[in-house]
Each structure stands twice: as structure tokens, then as C-alpha cells.
Amino acid sequence: MTSGALIIAALVYTYGLRIAVGDSSPFDYFGYFTNQTSLLASIIMIVTGSLTLAGRTSPPVLGLWRGIATAYLLVVAVIYNLLVPGTGSAPPWVSFLLHVVFPLYVALDWLLVGDRPRLRWRSFWALFPYPAVWLGVVLFRGATDGWVPYGFLLPERGAASLIAHIIGLVLAVAVAGSLVWGMSRFRVTAGSATRAT
């Protein structure tokens, strides 16, 4: 719960900095996949933690979304640090928090905390609608008002570059999802991984 609240506070703080310099558009700020998925993961962690404190079991759909958010943050960490390093308009500590610390924390939480569900492979498809909608909106905005969150999605780079990067993003989501789905089948206890029954 605390970690989720901290990330939301960091997002609000950074948005406040954008407002202070006259760049207050929430569509731009929350158009970044990093900001969207960090907010999503934070809300899921807060809800999950609240249910645990109340002595209630998290519903399966919440566990599914926790796994999905974990996969997205793995993609955020890898893609950002390989393709778009730098802080942009965010303070360096916020960028490091969102692109390194939080994804690592969420991945370790998924791997080490035993309250996660065993995700069914038949639900694997649920990984893809959200990024597909995000990409659709980004490409539409890039073609109309020229704004894209990441330089590799700029329309002027040409159709071949866009297609290659889109395929790369889809594959990254699939690989990250496979890791998360696979990790859901193991429990780490006393320093060793054991297959869940």
C-alpha cells in the first residue's frame, strides 16, 4: 500500500511541475505508457493491500490485473532504459523511481510474495487490449496533432520504422507476460523455488 501511495504522490508531484511551467494537459502527461501503467499498478497494490488488511481474499480478476500490470512495468523498464534513456521533463529521481525502482519492486513482489494467483494461460490474451488501445490513440494523435510520448513512434520516421517498433512492443509485452505467467506457477520459500500445486 505504501509503495503504491508513494508512486501516486510522485506522479502528482511531477504533474504539478508540468502545470507550473504551463504544460497542464493531462492527455499529454498521462499519454505516457510509463505514467499510465505506474498508476494502474499503484492502484492495484493499494486495493490488494487494503483487502489483505481487512482479512479478505483478493478476487481472481484483481490477481490477473496485478500480473498484467507487472508485465507492463517490465516492458517499461526494458524499453525505456534501452530506447529512450533520459528524464525528459521529470526530475531525475522521479524518472529513476518510475523506470527502475518501481518496476523492480513490482517484479520482486510478484516473484516473492506468495499471495499471487496462478495465472491461466487461457487468460494470456488479456495482456494485449490495453497496449493496443494505447498504441491506437498514440498513432492517431501523432498523425493529427503531432504529439507522441516517445520519439520512436514519430510518424516522420516512416511506416517501416513504426511497424518495426510496434511489432517490437507487442513482442516485448508477450515475452514479459510469459515471464509473469510462468512465475505465477512457482513459490519462492527458504531461498528456493517450488512449483505451485
Image: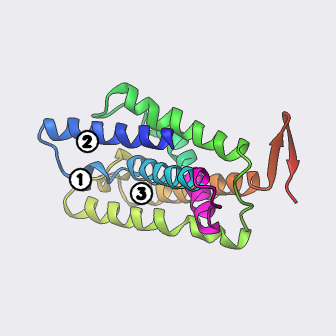
On residue 154, the disc is: none
Give the image quarter of residue 188. Answer: top right
What separation in Å lies between label 3 and label 2 (alpha carbons)? 28 Å
Find the magenta span and give its range: 52-71
Where's residue 118, x and y in %? 75, 61
Residue type, label 1: Pro
> Which residue carries the number 2 mark?
15
> Which residue carries the number 3 mark?
162
Which is the main secondary structure of the residues drawn in magenta? helix
Query: From the viewer's perspective, is the residue at label 3 or at label 2 nearer?
Result: 2
In the image, what residue occupies the spot 84% across and 33% down?
191
> Which residue carries the number 1 mark?
26
In the image, what residue occupies the spot 35% across and 39% down?
9
How many residues crowd mark 2 within 10 Å: few (<14), some (14–19), many (20+)? some
- In the rendered image, the residue lying farthest to the front is 54
Q: Does the magenta stretch include residue 155?
A: no
Where's residue 55, x and y in %? 63, 56
Vertically, is 88 above or below 139? above
Residue type, label 2: Tyr
In-image side of 162 versus 109 (left or right):
left
